[in-house]
Amino acid sequence: MEAIRKVRKWIMITGLVCIVLGYILLARNSISLAPALLVLGYCILVPAALI
């Protein structure tokens, strides 16, 4: 049970880092990597951490 919590915590942290980095890159006019990071964070990592 404790190992699952640690894994979920790291997945959530990774998802939040991807989201923040995606917005930073979006502000710097990156039109290729920024959307990929945002989709990865919002659609894959954060929901995976909540399940």
Image (cartoon, grey):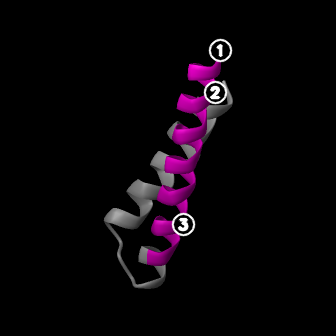
Residues under labels 1 and 2: Cα distance?
Answer: 7 Å
Residue 7 position in % (x across, y down): 53, 30
Secondary structure state at the residue bearing disc 3: helix
Element at label 1? loop
Residue 48 in which image quadrant: top right
Identify which residue is drawn at 39% across, 82% down. 29
In the image, 31: left or right of 26? left
Is 51 placed left or right of 3 in the picture?
right
Of callouts 2 and 3, which one flags the residue occurring earlier in the amino acid sequence?
2
Near mark 2 (Cα within 10 A), the count class, few <14, some 14-19 or many ≥20, is few
Looking at the image, is 9 positioned above or below residue 18? Answer: above
Q: Is residue 2 magenta?
A: yes
Is residue 5 shown in magenta? yes
The residue labelled by disc 2 is: 5
Q: Which residues are magenta?
A: 1-24
Q: Is tag 1's residue or tag 3's residue first in the polypeptide sequence?
A: 1
Q: CA distance from mark 1 to mark 3?
A: 29 Å
Q: CA distance from mark 2 to mark 3?
A: 22 Å
Image quadrant occupied by the C terminus? top right
Q: Amino acid at mark 1?
A: Met
Q: Nearer the viewer, mark 1 or mark 3?
A: 1
Amino acid at pointer 2: Arg
Q: Which residue is mark 3?
A: 20
According to the image, label 1 marks what residue?
A: 1
